[in-house]
Amino acid sequence: MLSMGWNLRSMDTVAKSSEMLLQKLIKNTRSNSIILLHDRCEITVEVLTQYIDYCLTEGFTFVTLKCPNEA
């Protein structure tokens, strides 16, 4: 089992609007950010495509975290 902490809490569970959530994510995303998002929040689903597009445009990449003993 891999335990990983996040360093950007999106607060998507209490966000008032998708625009506010997107702006918070954009403002606080840094190199090596690990972002806490919840797939059960409709507002998160609404902004995810825009946020991913922003990240890719800015040169960020996405990685899958694996346990050290996984092949």
Image (spheres, grey):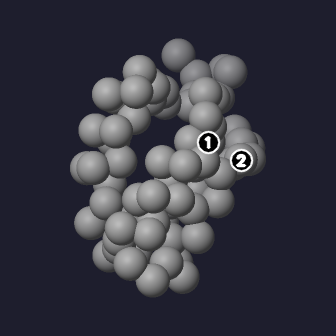
N-terminal of the pair, mark 1 or mark 2, is 2
Disc 1 and disc 2 in contact, CB within 8 angstroms: yes
Q: Is residue 18 above or below residue 4?
A: below
- The quarter of the picture where residue 36 lies is bottom right
Q: Is residue 37 above or below residue 59?
A: below
Query: Which residue lies most toward the top here?
Result: 71
* Residue type, mark 1 in image: Ile
Please give the name of the residue rendered at 53% of the width and 59% of the height, measured from the top-left corner. 24
* Image x and y of residue 71, in percent: 53, 16
Please give the name of the residue rendered at 35% of the width and 71% of the height, measured from the top-left corner. 18
- The quarter of the picture where residue 22 lies is bottom left
Q: Is residue 22 left or right of residue 1?
A: left
User: Which numbered circle lies on residue 34?
Assistant: 1
- Mark 2 crowdedness (10 Å alpha carbons): few <14, some 14-19, many ≥20: some
Dot 2 corresponds to which residue? 7
User: Which numbered circle lies on residue 25?
Assistant: none
Please give the name of the residue rendered at 45% of the width and 58% of the height, measured from the top-left corner. 23
* Image x and y of residue 20, in percent: 44, 69
* Residue type, mark 2 in image: Asn
- Taking depth in this image into account, of 70 and 9 the one nearest to the observer is 9
- Taking depth in this image into account, of 7 and 25 the one nearest to the observer is 25
Examine the rendering and report whether any part of residue 39 can be seen: no
